[in-house]
Structure formats: structure tokens, C-alpha cells
Image (spheres, rainbow, N blue to C red):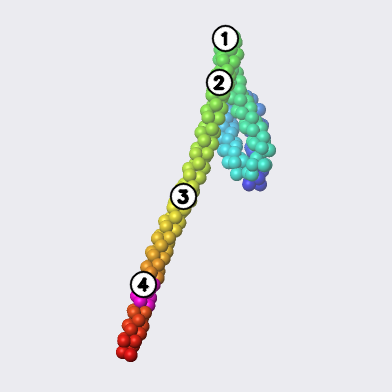
């Protein structure tokens, strides 16, 4: 898993280096050339965000004892992409101010205030976005915990069902053994009664034989 994470790191470093270079060029360009470069940077930033998502998934699969180190690295990468996104937005706004200066002349002095207001709103949106992302992350983790709990409950339920089945089998075997023992005990009693009756008959026969023998003399 760590090898995949390091591969994503290399891709992250390569793309962010290219993005940094292009962001520095944006304010110097105009027209179609600037538009194409802005679209290209925007696309690369999306690729970087996807890399961060993949890295986040990889960190979840890393053993707990090593996870803290990778979490720290991932956090620094997220901070880096946030800075790049801010720089990207500032570079586009800076170009917009130059256009206003050319069109409005002296009246363009208010563009600084507009720019500051726009940057302030942008930062507020970014903070809201980070809070939403954190909330989503918590929801995902909560869902995972819930799935683990449900899985454990399902496993415990299967164990309880197997235990009940074993108890039923044991009860059935005990019932069968009890019936066998009862039958054996009944036969033993019957045999003893028969022996007693047979002994009584033999004893009575002997007595009668002795009686008739004595009487005949």
C-alpha cells in the first residue's frame, strides 16, 4: 500500500510543479492564450484533487502504527493545494484588474477595493468548503463505523443461531438417550419381575413335591 502512496506522491509533485509555473505566467498573458492556460491549470488542479482522494484512500488501508506519518504528509499536501488554488484565483483577479485599468483609466483605482472584497469572499467560500469537506469526511467515517457495527452484529447473530442449533441438537440427543434409558430400565424391571415369578413357581413346585412325597409315605 505504501508503494502506491509514494507513486501518487511523485505524480502530485510533478503536477504541482507544473501548475506553480503556469500560475506565475497567467498574469502576463491575455486573450485566447490566457484562457487556454487557465483552463489547463484548472484541469491539472482537478487531477491533483483526485490524487489527494486516492492518497486518502491509501492511508486508510495502511496499518495503524504507520498511519500517523502518512496522515501528516497528506495534510501538508492538502495545505499545498489550498495555497495553489488561492494563488491561481489571485492570478486571474490580477489580470482582471489590469483590464479595468486599461478600460477605465483613473476610475480604476477602486479595483483594489473590489479585489480585496472579492478575495475576502473567496476565502469565506474556501473556509465553508473546507467545513463541508470535514463534515463529509466525518459522515463517511461514521458510515464506515456503522457498517463495521452491523457486520459485527450480523456475525454475532450467526454465532447465536449456531449455538441455538447446537442446543437443539443436544436436547434432541438427550431426549433420545432418555427414551433409551427408560426403555432399558423398563426391560430390567420386567426381567426382574419374571425372574421373581419364575423363582416363586419353582419354589412352590419344590414345596408341593416335598409335601406330596411326605404324604405318600
Q: Residue at x 67, y 42 (%)?
A: 65
Percent position (x, y) of residue 148?
A: 52, 42
Dots 3, 4 in contact, CB < 8 A: no
Q: Residues within 10 Å of mark 2 (few under 14, many from 20)?
A: few
Mark 1 surroundings within 10 Å by alpha-carbon count, few (fewer than 14), some (14 through 19), many (20 or more): few
Q: Earlier in the sequence, mark 1 or mark 3?
A: 1
Whichever of callouts 2 and 3 sits on the residue coming sooner in the sequence is 2
Q: Is residue 14 above or below residue 94?
A: below
Q: Is residue 197 magenta?
A: yes
Residue shown at the point (47%, 53%) measured from the top left: 163
Please indicate whether residue 55 sits to the left or right of residue 164 in the image.
Answer: right
Q: Which residue is mark 1?
A: 107
Q: Nearer the viewer, mark 1 or mark 2?
A: 2
Tell me whether circle 1 and circle 2 mark residues in contact (CB < 8 Å).
no
- How far across and how far down the image is residue 132, in percent? 52, 28
Along the viewing direction, whichever of 111 and 160 lies nearer the viewer: 160
| Mark before the other along the chain sequence, 1 or 2 | 1
Q: Nearer the viewer, mark 1 or mark 3?
A: 3
* Circle number at residue 124: 2
Report the residue that reaches farthest toward the top: 106
Tell me the residue that label 3 is attached to: 160
Report how far apart the C-alphas of labels 1 and 4 lie in the structure.
129 Å
Is tag 1's residue or tag 4's residue first in the polypeptide sequence? Answer: 1
Amino acid at each position: 500500500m505504501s508503494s502506491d502512496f509514494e507513486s501518487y506522491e511523485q505524480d502530485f509533485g510533478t503536477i504541482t510543479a507544473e501548475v506553480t509555473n503556469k500560475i506565475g505566467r497567467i498574469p502576463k498573458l491575455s486573450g485566447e492564450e490566457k484562457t487556454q492556460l487557465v483552463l489547463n491549470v484548472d484541469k491539472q488542479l482537478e487531477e491533483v484533487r483526485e490524487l489527494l482522494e486516492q492518497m486518502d484512500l491509501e492511508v486508510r488501508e495502511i496499518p495503524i502504527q504507520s498511519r500517523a506519518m502518512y496522515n501528516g504528509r497528506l495534510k501538508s499536501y492538502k495545505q499545498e493545494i489550498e495555497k495553489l488554488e488561492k494563488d491561481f484565483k489571485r492570478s486571474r483577479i490580477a489580470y482582471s484588474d489590469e483590464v479595468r485599468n486599461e478600460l477605465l483609466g483613473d476610475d480604476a483605482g477602486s479595483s483594489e477595493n473590489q479585489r480585496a472584497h472579492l478575495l475576502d469572499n473567496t476565502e469565506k467560500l474556501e473556509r465553508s468548503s473546507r467545513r463541508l469537506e470535514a463534515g463529509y469526511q466525518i459522515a463517511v467515517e461514521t458510515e464506515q463505523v456503522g457498517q463495521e457495527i452491523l457486520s459485527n452484529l450480523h456475525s454475532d447473530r450467526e454465532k447465536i443461531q449456531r449455538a441455538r442449533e447446537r442446543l437443539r441438537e443436544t436436547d434432541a440427543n438427550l431426549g433420545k438417550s432418555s427414551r433409551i434409558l427408560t426403555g432399558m430400565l423398563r426391560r430390567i424391571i420386567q426381567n426382574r419381575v419374571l425372574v421373581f415369578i419364575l423363582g416363586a413357581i419353582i419354589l412352590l413346585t419344590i414345596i408341593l413335591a416335598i409335601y406330596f412325597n411326605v404324604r405318600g409315605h
